[in-house]
Amino acid sequence: MTRTGSIPAVLERAKALVGPSLRRAVELLSPELRPLAAYHLGWCDADGRPSADDGGKGVRPALAILSAEAVGAHQAYGVPGGVAVELVHNFSLIHDDVIDEDAERRHRPTVWSLFGIGRAVIVGDAMQALAQQVILDPKLLGLVPELAGDDLSAASAARCIADATAEMIAGQALDMAFEAVPTVDVEGCLAMEAGKTGALLGCASSIGAVLAGAPEGSVAALKRFGVELGMAFQAVDDLLGIWGDPVATGKPASSDLRQHKKTLPVAAALAAGGALAEELAGLLCESRLEERQVSRAAGLVETLGGREAAGEEAERRLGSALAALEDADLTPSAHDELVEVARFVVDREH
């Protein structure tokens, strides 16, 4: 497979396909909210001047495009799904930054830190609503009608988006609740992450096939691939949230520990038990951690096996995702690109 640097070529191809429709969708927002969405997506700076930032990796739109191609459909069937999942994903990021009080994302000030919490909340709400609008009426994106899917497929895709969004929000609620308790077991952590990340990746990986009216078996296999990939994605995110390079991630080192998040490495470390696990639990109960305490907590998580456990979980979930692809009759080229995207997700450094 050809690559652009270390980035799978399909990510750039999907951006070229979905990007213009995503911009067209954002133009449908009210004049008060449009600049905030454009800023968050990396299209302009805080003053509205065009920016060279491309707004992220684009994994979800690529999965939507590939899910259509995987069942032998034209790539255009995946475009409304790619736009919708990208809108939902980015609405969640804007709200997450408010919840976590993060002042920086992708090396730029976050929406709330620039424009205020109220405006950040409302633009996120608007992007969530817009995702449903473009799925139910793809003509808003200027697509050729015969490649926009039928009403029944659009309704099924809208249900896919709605269900994934509800699961994602429930997962986020659990994540917040975990910050206030001393320990979380690995099973509970994985259940939270299945909702927080797995659900939307499952939707992204199947929504193009849904819009193309593909057989249920193929849709189910693609969704299972996406859910498992989402779990691998989150396990890697959890590792980066503690040990990631701030230059690459755009966030401070050990940011998850500062926010008392019970991510997978932390849950696995706490499950080890003993005096060191008790010390870690005590640190995470502190209202505010000093830098030396953050460093100590990161060291304890690694010593207790949390880092290794999360890495193993990422690899295991990747294996499960790839196995799911073998349960469906997919076009060989799309199958291979799905595999490439999956491996990129697990091997990434940001």
Image: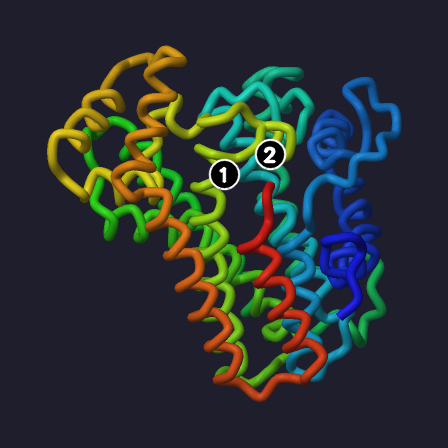
Q: For the point 80% across and 40% down, which residue is it?
A: 27
Q: For the point 27% across and 34% down, which residue is it?
A: 178
- Quarter of the image with the N terminus is bottom right
In the rendered image, which residue does mark 2 sit on? 249
Graded by Cα atoms within 10 Å as few (under 14), some (14 to 19) or many (20 or more), the crowding at tag 1 reads many
Quick one: SS at disc 1? helix
> On screen, 55 above or below 247?
below
Q: For the point 57% across and 32% down, which residue is it?
A: 245
Q: CA distance from mark 2 to mark 1?
A: 8 Å
| Residue 350 locus on image (x, y percent) | 60, 41
Graded by Cα atoms within 10 Å as few (under 14), some (14 to 19) or many (20 or more), the crowding at tag 2 reads some
Residue 48 is left or right of residue 39, and the answer is right
Q: Which mark is residue 264?
A: none
Residue 246 in sight from this viewpoint: yes
Q: Are the residues at dot 2 and dot 1 in contact (C-beta closer than 8 Å)?
A: yes
> On screen, 259 above or below 153?
above
In the rendered image, which residue does mark 1 sit on? 240
Residue 19 is left or right of residue 260, and the answer is right
Task: Single out the residue that lies furthest toward the front.
Answer: 303
Tag 1: residue type? Leu
Quick one: SS at disc 2? helix
- All told, the count of numbered labels is 2
| Residue 225 locus on image (x, y percent) | 49, 69
| Residue 284 locus on image (x, y percent) | 26, 24
Tag 2: residue type? Thr
Q: For the point 31% across and 35% down, which residue is it?
A: 301
